[in-house]
Amino acid sequence: MEKKIDLTLKVWRQRDRKAKGQFETYNVKGISTDSSFLEMLDVLNEQLINEGKEPVVFDHDCREGICGMCSLYINGHPHGPDSAITTCQLHMRKFNNGDTITIEPWRSAGFPVIRDLMVDRTAYDQIIAAGGYTSVNVGGAQDANALLIPKTDADEAMDAASCIGCGACVAACKNGSAMLFVSAKVSQLALLPQGRVEAARRARAMVAKMDELGFGNCTNTGACAAECPKSVSLSNIARLNREFIKAKLQD
Amino acid sequence: MSKLESKIPAGPLAEKWTNYKATQKLVNPANKRRLDIIVVGTGLAGGAAAATLGELGFNVINFCIQDSPRRAHSIAAQGGINAAKNYQNDGDSVYRLFYDTIKGGDYRAREANVYRLAEVSNNIIDQCVAQGVPFAREYGGLLDNRSFGGAQVSRTFYAKGQTGQQLLLGAYSSLMRQVNKGKVDLRTRYEMLDVVIVDGRARGVIMRNLVTGGIERFSAHAVVIATGGYGNVFFLSTNAMASNGSAAVQCYRKGAYFANPAYAQIHPTCIPVHGEFQSKLTLMSESLRNDGRIWVPKKKEDAEAIRAGKLKPTEIKEEDRDYYLERRYPAFGNLVPRDVASRAAKERCDAGYGVGTGLAVYLDFSDAIKRLGRDAVEARYGNLFQMYEKIVDDNPYETPMMIYPASHYTMGGIWVDYELQTTIPGLFAIGEANFSDHGANRLGASALMQGLADGYFVLPYTIQNYLSDQIQVPRFSTDLPEFAEAEKAVKARIDRLMAIKGKQSVDSLHKKLGRIMSDYVGMGRNKAGLEKALVEIDKIKKEFYSDLRIPGEAYGLNVELEKALRLEDFIEIGKLMAIDALHREESCGGHFREEHQTEEGEAKRNDEEFMYVGCWEYKGEDQKPELHKEELNYEFIKVQQRNYKQ
């Protein structure tokens, strides 16, 4: 049942990439437990605007857990305390009246802050640009059913492909590693015959780009998979390592 | 009326596209390198177009409002994409997909465009599989299909409940490949604020850099608008928060005709509104209607008891349930098209049989779970059930889902000819941003099809027919007076809004607009209501210009300013929708005028007077736009009353 709760928010405010940020404390009252976390921030922003202050800047778009735009490090967890969901699907019924909630941006060398809680994740696009595709132009494809793909492979590829590119894995990782993200794309395409053709080149190029952009190394702590809103499996990292070693052996 | 030349190629329907391609003008590879194309938007249409134009060798500048092209709202499409493959051997064909789409659109779409769409639908599936899109498969390794509304065959390809995501990621991957090759110059976190016309042709855009707040000029030989629909005019909709109609309005203000603005789709299966701070509505895929049955209590007292919390839906006996879609439309049952299903839900709730807050009906899976087992249902819809449970805190395996219609898609948009060119030469519109293929109502799983058809297979051809005589035209300088003027006007517009310094936030004004749009320009419309809407929208416009408050700076990162600029355009669109709805004295598809219905409450078209595309020409601020008509001639299909009963 719906309840109304009052909260204290400690929100990270930072003017731009170079500015020194700090926490600001705000109080919000009468938040419906049926509303989402971002709707709670909407209430805070409406309050700030009415007080003549600048609202808190945060990324969000689809608000149904699929675009990967929302982020937020809430009480020490990427996408907050609930499991297998994004911040936009986190609902206030997960909090209690009187709680203090700490809200920070993703913190990682790979994702510099733009303002407040908004960070720059274009590094992910650069990694995909390095090789996260099959090199086929429009027009030359054969009939879709000419290629038989075992259902189990297609399903496994789909699970890997469900990554939304939000960056929670990097934010969760003590090394700031992007291995789960990279491995999800490498796995999806390595599992399918269409992607096998370039599997070695892809693994090499994407890992090299990841290293170049300043993401850390993987030490198998598993924090990334535990915090992933789409439950992308750690076994993808094992597959990436296998593909990478195979590629190196080919060199 | 020369401007509304639809340029439909001659010849039999099935040969038009082939003939067009055989006789159109092309641009040779060396000359492609000398031509620049701006594509605004990176969804299925924009992303696919930018990637394909890059592959062909053009220089593309591609703008994206989000931080990455992978986030465009196409990503949220759940259920699937249609194609006429007939892999299920159930009698499907290009003609049948074409026919279903025309009929689904209530005979208000252009025949030739729709046939082409059905024709290229098969290429889309081939292309996506080649990209590595992990479509669902059967144990034998072949592709699986499901059914969607308005069809009697299974022609919908899907990737779990995330088909839009997988198709978009396919287009995004192709796009990033071209970025890597240097053929596409990708600019993220940019929003279009004007289109620049030089000597009557679209030659560039004025963009706002959303990070720095800077106003920047870009020039090209042609401009492609792929910015989606304007469903957020209702404030609450299934669209993403940043989805907006501004680029379309800018084209409209510069002379492009706006077609059929009143045709908006209200999707029947969304999670109902919970409270006043709600920011958006979440769709539950139409695919759920494959196995879910929609019902309300047969007795009013049961409905009242449920609303008061005294009865649970599971306590209502089978004979006391009214499966109203199965009752009214035996041939299509729960799989009637969206407009029909939405109106039927509203009718039951208006009559007092609604559950929940009174504005909800049940979508029940208990029969499917009995028939197939819980595991099979979970395999099909698991992620949707999980999403529902996270939002509503109810378990749909045990108790029926509650759903209600919500604004979802806009069939109306910028008018384009067969080549997807607007009334401004050199300005093209693709995907949801144009009006072309869905008539007055879009069928499920057809938006993805149209976006990708336009982006991969249609525009990359037709734009060459335009560019073929532009090969001698040198690259444009953005120092031309036309660019300076456009930039000056954009800055004046921003300064005007920043100077208001009133008391109301953008969202609070947007909510007011949304309420009026839902009440008077929503699922049911009538003359008095629409006239009232026009008066009320003008009042909101006045409030907007006198009492709006935007904190922060004009030329820095400023989210409130972004929203204010979009709302200013939504007010224009809202008016245009009401004007169009008022003029169209008939009911068709998503446009339901209460004065025009059959005795059974079905939409009643008036083909004698309204078998045309209503195209509106901008005549200046606060001036009534001028109506132009593109007559629709059905040469190949027999126009009938839409019937989903038998």
Image (cartoon, helix red, strand yellow):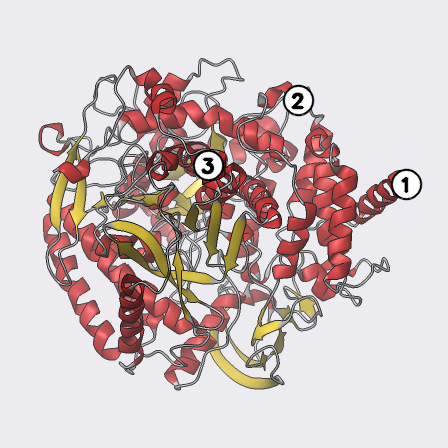
Tag 1 and tag 3 share a subunit:
no
The amino acid pointed to by label 2 is Leu
Label 1: chain letter: A
Question: In 3D space, how far apart are the residues under numbered discs 2 and 1 (Cα atoms)?
Answer: 29 Å
Residue A65 is situated, as x and y percent measured from the top left of the image, at: 56, 54
Dot in front, 2 or 1: 1
Q: Which residue is mark 1?
A: A249
Secondary structure category for the residue under label 2: loop
Q: Which residue is mark 3?
A: B452
Residue A239 is situated, as x and y percent measured from the top left of the image, at: 81, 43
Question: In 3D space, how far apart are the residues under numbered discs 3 and 2 (Cα atoms)?
Answer: 21 Å
Q: In the figure, B273 relative to A115: above or below?
A: above
Question: In 3D space, how far apart are the residues under numbered discs 1 and 3 (Cα atoms)?
Answer: 39 Å
The amino acid pointed to by label 1 is Leu
Residue in the picture at 46% in, 78% down: A55
Is A157 left or right of A95, judged from the image as shown? right
Q: Is residue A109 visible?
A: yes
Is A110 left or right of B595, judged from the image as shown? right
Q: Looking at the image, do the residues carrying marks 2 and 1 touch, with CB atoms under 8 Å apart?
A: no
Q: Residues within 10 Å of mark 3 (few under 14, many from 20)?
A: many
* Residue B500 sits in quarter: bottom left
Considering depth in this image, is B28 or B358 the residue closer to the camera? B28
Q: In the figure, B517 relative to B19: above or below?
A: below
Q: Earlier in the sequence, mark 2 or mark 1?
A: 2
Q: Which residue is mark 2?
A: A147
Q: Is residue B398 visible?
A: no
Is B42 left or right of A82, judged from the image as shown? left
The amino acid pointed to by label 3 is Leu
* Residue B10 sits in quarter: top left
Q: In the figure, B196 relative to B21: above or below?
A: below
